[in-house]
Structures are given as structure tokens and as C-alpha cells.
Image (tube, coloured by chain):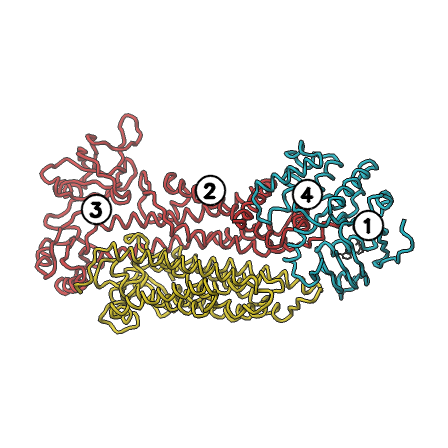
Amino acid sequence: MILHPGVISLLIGSLLVTIMLCYSAYEGAIIARDWDINSGSERQLGLERKTYLVSTMMTYAMGFQLLSLFLFIATTDALSHLFIGAMCAAGSLNVNAFGYPTMLLKLANFVLGGIWLIVNAADNRGYDYPLIRIKYILLICLSPLLLTETLLQGFYLLNLSPNLITSCCSVIFAEDSRSFAAGLATLPRQPAQLAFILSAAAVLVLGIRFLRWRKGAVLFALAVLAFFAVSLASIVSFVSLYIYELPTHHCPFCILHAEYGYIGYPLYLTLLLGTISGTGVGALAPFGGIASLAAILPSIQRRLTLLTLLCFLVFLLLTGASIGLSNLDLSAY
Amino acid sequence: MSLIEKHRNIIDYTLSSLGRRKGKTFAVCLVYSFIIFLLASVVFFTQAIKREADLLLREAPEMTVQRLEAGRQTTVPAAYADGIGRIRGVQSVQKRLWGYYFDSLTGANYTVMVNASLNGREGQAIVGSGVLLRGAAEGESRKIQAGDSLPVKTYRGEALMLKVAGILPFASELETADLIQVSERDYRDIFNAEAGRYTDLALQVRNRKELATIATKIVRQYPDTRPILREDILRTYDAIFDWRGGLSIMTMAGALFAFIILAWDKATGLSAEEKKEIGILKAIGWETGDILQVKFWEGVSVSLTSFSIGIFAAYLHVFVGSSLLFEPVLKGWSVLYPDFRLTPHIDAYQLVSLLFITVLPYTVATIIPSWRSATIDPDSVMRA
Amino acid sequence: MITLSNIRKVYNAGRPNEFTAIRDVSLELEPNKTTVLKGPSGSGKTTLLSMLGCMTRPTAGRILLGQREITSLPEKFLAEIRRSTFGFIFQQLNLIRGITVLENVMLPAYPTGERRSEVVARAMALLDLCNLSHKAEARVEWLSGGEAQRAAIARALINGPAIIICDEPTAHLDTALSLEFMETMKRLRDDGKTILIASHDPLVNDSDAVDRIVEIRDGRLVPPKACA
Ligand SMILES: Nc1ncnc2c1ncn2[C@@H]1O[C@H](COP(=O)(O)OP(=O)(O)O)[C@@H](O)[C@H]1O
Ligand SMILES: [Mg+2]
């Protein structure tokens, strides 16, 4: 183990988040079992009050989770020079088998947790808490994932030691290797760019369609997910090249460095936020028929859609600016 | 729009409510800022020291070659330098002479090093800003200035007067503060260093990727040598510094824990007055969620205030006050510099880590007590 | 119009100290009238008021506020109704010490998210109405009994409620102030408010500001004989 302040923070953070989530899931299970909105009993009142506790804990937990996602990447980045061959987070994550799974799970949990918060917020506004069982069952499903994340991150951090030998981004994302990461890097550029533009257009069109005619929420959410995946692949495949102004450097982490103006942070932040709110629109769609939500859902979904479009717009502008202002001319390669 | 207005109202109320409980708020803030101050000092200090070491080593050659005799470092014959210079990929070999000198007058340790530009200007020296001079008359030490004469005792016990020709420009305190640069002949005079032998060799290579290969070749050719790569030193340094910093944080976990308990206790032990206040608010139409927001903003303002105070104090402590509290713990192995000042540097990453170590546990510790007080029965005020 | 049907309130249900404070109360309260709940101490007046005022939920029975059934609403929505529909004047006045009269009056409007300047203007107008505008910036602990009472009235009115609920409002007032209070209630009723007062003070019960008296004893309504 490396006793770096960042490592300690991450361990403390994930421990606390896990405790909160497990507690919430436990209380959630009781609520889901005993909930009876029509009862005037003190027990029901107690459960109602517990929902506040669970919501508060989950909101805090998600806030920490967002910070911890970035702290995790920044920490692995800061530790990279301790490992032979590593130059950024890509190398540090590769030091042992737990690095990349931790990061991917963190990402997934963050998105899932965000969607849960959206469902929770919608439910809290319906006068009979119509989604209460569903949302607590979802919460219970979410907790094993978070537990796994904590364990993976624990294994990853505890198994770090200086002088481990690893390979860095230029190798992991090299075009001539045969891994999944390398596969992303070698995606033929023109089709990748085309997919990027097409998925962005799909999000825009479906978003406007939803705003205008209140139709196709799920389709919109799917398009958002597709755009998320395509964007991540695009960052590795071609966006990074323009940012680094190097025709062969495909690393998705170095863009977080000061040399590139920390451009990675706003890029990932807008992409993640947009993805969460966009999938939230779809996640709420099945509940439109519930009487107590019928009046509220459209306005929530509408705002989420606008937020998604706004986030993605900023994301696209930043990407576009990075490409447009780059001195790299890829036509030669 | 109305959401913002609502938050503004609630924040207003929170601040006035905190103001009404000055004693309690002050007590929590005091302990909270002290904990943050301690932890931030450790983090700032370790990171600053690492940076210093980094700067120092950035100047260092990519590879140094030492010679070992009976497992201990010894001098390198000039012939080695020639032989190594002929290895493919080696760009240049610099023969270096340097050593440590203890000045009994001021009680300080200096690094003495040969500066080739002083060859032919025997009797002159270029020194770092941390070198002290003990004035004969005043009997007190003071900082050296250009033009001063620095007395150095040679191995025979004779005094050699070195005229200070210049002060090294400030780059990194660790690097230059304790340095005395002299000509090669003066060096050999002071330390009785055998002619034709050097302390170690500094190598420049053409391609950094070949460092490892070149190191292997050197050892094969001269089995009694030990090549050291700059990257290796950096890694070892960093790990040591981090380890020490981390260890200090861990020992402070006790203090942190005690604080969490205090926070919990303060948050749980609502006075009758506070309970009544929350009851009134709920009775006149505030909702549990509104009270939770009050509690949230209460936490934010207490944490933010304490965090700023703690960070500010730690900054002063580490970068202006020379880390008075930690020097013995964190720098124990190194030479004590006469006047040691770290280059101020903090970044967002350090702050976020600190936030995680301090604010997060505090926040979690106050969730349940806040919720308890927020769920007071609204009709409780109707019966007193 | 508030309709209560078969309301029952049990405290500490299932525990040895179980206590039924209200039993099978059915009642209709007309709008724009002053109704007094009369009964000895411990008869359940406060309990009934707190259920009417959406502070607690009955253990059984239904309460309709206009057409809306409020018995099964979660606390969160009860708070919203409480805030917008009811104004409360408590026996203990319950002003918050340490802050000014003006702030106290504005408190119920904080969670509504109204513009602060509008709330301030309305609060000042109400204080004016209650002859308290000169004390707006004073702390509540410096008010006299009558002034505090008027501040509490202003606070009850800040969100423009349709119904005013008063629990033993004259318990700590002398005769003159009690009469003044009943005058104010009369004026509010004439302005179209519905007023509900729980009291066993004869001064209240005999006041000509009162339209109807409901008697309660041991948690049950006493059948009306002849109303004075
Ligand atoms: N929270 C409570 N727990 C148990 N008993 C209560 C509670 N609140 C009120 N009571 C009981 O209910 C009865 C009615 O009280 P209350 O409504 O305050 O009467 P009133 O206002 O007419 O004096 C009293 O006997 C009181 O002791
Ligand atoms: Mg009473």
C-alpha cells in the first residue's frame, strides 16, 4: 500500500459511502416491506420520516461519489511516477488487475446512482409516494454494485507499491497492440467521426421531438446512452489526438493534465451529467400513467431533457473547439 | 427562480440561527479548524518537500555511476569515465567531486561541490543563500553576502579563507540553500581527495529508453560500479515522503475520530431551545425537508469556515512559519538547514483530498442527528 | 368547509400507555364562521385542532378539506397545506427569540420561495394593521404580552390563510387584551376568514364574535342542547 493522502481520502470516502448505502438499503428494505400509505399509524409515520433519512444519505453519497470518481483518477494520475513505465492514470490503473474494473464500476455506479436520485426526486413529489417500493428495491439492487466497487478499489489501492512495472498510455492505447483499449484506438477514424456526429444528431433530434411532442422518452434515453459510449470511444479514437496534437497519442487520461488546460474535466463532467439526466428521462417514462405523477413528470422530464441538451452542447462545443483550434492535421496520416 | 429565493431565505435563517448560538458554533469551528490545520499542514509539507526534491532531481543527471568497495561507496578512477564514455548511446560523462562539510563554527552542514567555472579562480567560492557566517566581533551568525570571507577548515586543520564571489540564484531551497561551490584544487585541498579520482560520474544519454541497457553494459564492463537512474531516486523519494505524510495522517486519525464524536455529540445534543425552535418552524408550515436544508447549510457554513481557517493557518504554518510543528517528524533524516523555507504551492488536488479526509466524515457524522431534529413532531409546540 | 368523519386519535398505540384522545368525532365546520371548541383541560381540544390543522394525522377516520381528502397525505404535503391554508396562534405564542419581530412574522413564508421584498412588504403591512410597525426591528423578547400576541396574529396571516386556528389564545391575557383579541378575530371573520378557537375561557365563549360553540369532553362531542 502507498500511504498517499489521496489514497487515504479514497479509502475513507468509499468506506463512508458504502456504510451509508448499506444502511439506506437496509432501511429501504423495511420501508418497501411495511409501507402502507393509507395507514395513520405511528409506524407508517416513522417510515415516512425514514424516507427523508434515506434520501439525504443517498444525495450525500452521490455527491461524494462524483468527487471520488475524479479524485480516483487524479490520484492514480498523481501516483503514476511511482511505477516504472507509467506516465499518467492509464499506467497506474494497469499496475494490477483491479485498476480498470474499479474505474469502470465507479463510472457505472455514478450513472446508476444519479438515475436513482432522479427517480427519487420524482417520487417525492407525488402525494402518495407512488414509486416507493420500486425505488427502494432498485436501491437494494444498487448496493451490491457499490460494495463491489469499494472492495475492488480497496484491493487496487492496497496492492499498490512503488516500483511496480506497468505500461503506459502510449502502449496501452497503441495502435499496434491487440487489447480492447487498443481496439478503440485503432477504430477507423472516419467511421468513428461519422458515428460521433450521427449519435449527436440523434440525441438532438430525439430530444427536440420529445420536448415538442412528448413522445419517445425511452428512445431519447437510448440515444443518450449510445452517444455516451460513442463519445468515450471517440475521445480515445480521435478527439485526444487533436488535443495532444500528436497523431499517435490516444490516452483518455492525459487530457486531465494541466498541459492541456484540464480540458478533460469539463469534457467528462458535461458528458456524465448529460448522460445521467438523459437516461433519467427514459427511466421516468414507465411511470407517466400514475395518477399522482401524471401532472408532475412532464415538467421534470422536460427540464431533464433541456439539461441533457445543454450539457451535450457544451461538450460538443468543447470538443469542436479542441479539434478546430488544434495544430494537428490528420489528413496526412 | 423561486427555488433560489427559497434557498436564500433558508440560508438567511441558518446564518442567523448559527449567530444566535455563538458559543456552540465557535467551539465546533475551533476544533474543526484545528484538525484541518494539522492534516493540511502534513499534506502541504509533504507535497512541498516532494516538489523541492523533484526540482532538485530534475537538475540531476539521468544516470549517476558510483563505485563500491567492500559494499561502501568509494571514489571512481578517471579511467572508468573514459571507458564508460565509449559505450554506445552515452552522450557525455561528467566527473563530479562533491562532499559534505560540517562547519563547527555555525554548527551547520554544507554540501561542497566543484564548479568547473571556478577552476583557475582558486580561493573563491559561490555559495547558497542558506550558508551562514559567524561574525568574529558580534559572535552571532548571519547570512553570507558576496564579498564576505568564508573560513573553511582543511583536512589538515588549517583554515582556508574562501572569498564569496557570488550567491546562487534561488530555484529550489533544498537544492541550493546549503551549497558551497569551489574550484577543483581547493576541493582536493579541503578534503585531501586523491588526484585522478572522483566522487561519482554523471552521465547524459542520447535516448532515455536506452538507460537500462546502458546501465547493464556499465556493470558488465566495471563490475564494481553501481549505476543509479534518476527515475529510481525520484520514485524512492516520493514513496518515502508519501509514506511519512500518510503515517502522520494515520496517527492523526485518532484526533479526527475524537472530533467526529464531538460533532456527533454537538449535533445530537440539541438544547431545549433549539428543539422548540424547530418545532415552531414545523408547526407554522416548514417541512422536514426544509429543516434538513437548514441543517445542510449549517454544515456547509461551519465546514467552509473551518476549512478556510484551517487551510489558511496551515499555509502560513508550512510556507511562512517553516513548519515548526512538523520539522522533526517529517524531515528527521535530513540535514537541518539554517533557514529553510518551502516554495509555496497548493493545488486543487490537495484541497479535494483534504476535503475528503475531514469534511466528509464530519458531514456523515451529522446526517443522522440532523435528521432526528428535522423530524420533530410539528404538534409538539402545541403542548408545552 | 372542513368535514370530519369518525375521527379517532390514539396516542402510543399498542403500548401499555396507549391513550385514546379523540373518539369517533364527526363534525362539519362552515367556512367564514367563528367556531369555538369548548371543553375542560385534557378533553382533546388541542389534539382535534392539530388534526384539523394538518399537524398530525388521525389514527382512523377521514378529514376532508373542501373536496380534498387529507388523511392519507404524507407529512410533506400536509406541511404544504398547513403553510398555505392555515394560520396558527398558539397558547404559548411560540415566537422565536433572538430574531426581530419582522423576521418572526416572515418565517412561514420562507419555504414558499416568494421574493423577499414582497414578503417584507406584506409583513410590514400586517404589522401596520396590528399597530406594531414601530416594533418591527425589535427583538421579540422585549415585547409586552399584548404586543407579542399581535405579532403572533401577524405571523398567522402572512401567507394569506383561509382558516385561522387559535389554541387557548386568551390564556395569558388580561380582560382588556382578551376583548381586543376577540375584536380582531371578529374583524378577520368579517374579512372572510374561517376561525377556529379552542378555549375554556368564558370570555371567549360569551363573545358575540362567536357563531358556533362545539363542546367536547373526554374526546367526544357533547350533543348540542341549546346554544347561547
Ligand atoms: N403526545 C401525546 N401522548 C400521549 N398522550 C397525549 C399526547 N398529547 C395529548 N395527550 C393526551 O390527550 C388528552 C387530550 O389532550 P389535549 O388535546 O391537549 O387536551 P386539551 O387541549 O383539551 O387540554 C390529554 O389527556 C393528554 O394527556
Ligand atoms: Mg390544549
Q: Secondary structure at mark 4?
A: helix
- Residue occupied by mark 2: B309
Residue flagged by tag 4: what amino acid is it?
Arg
Q: Which mark is residue B99?
A: 3
Q: Colour of chain B?
A: red
Gap in angstroms between the C-alphas marked 3 and 2? 43 Å
| Residue at the spot of label 4 | C155
Taking the view exactly as shown, the residue that stands out farthest to the top is: B137
Question: Which quarter of the figure has residue C65?
Answer: bottom right
Q: Is residue B75 left or right of residue A31?
A: left
Are the residues under marks 3 and 1 on the same chain? no
**Labels 4 and 2 touching (C-beta < 8 A):** no
Determine which residue is flagged by label 1.
C36
Looking at the rendered structure, the secondary structure element under dot 2 is: helix
| Left or right: B234 as drawn, with respect to A39 | left
Discs 3/1, front:
1
**Front position among marks 3 and 2:** 2
Q: Which residue extends farthest right? A: C225
Q: Nearer the viewer, residue B92 or C35?
A: C35
Within 10 angstroms of label 1, few (less than 14), some, or many (20 or more) residues?
many
Q: Nearer the viewer, residue A277 or B72?
A: A277
Q: State the residue at coordinates (62%, 46%).
A: C109
Determine the colour of chain A.
yellow
Whole-Å distance between the Cαs marked 1 and 2? Answer: 57 Å
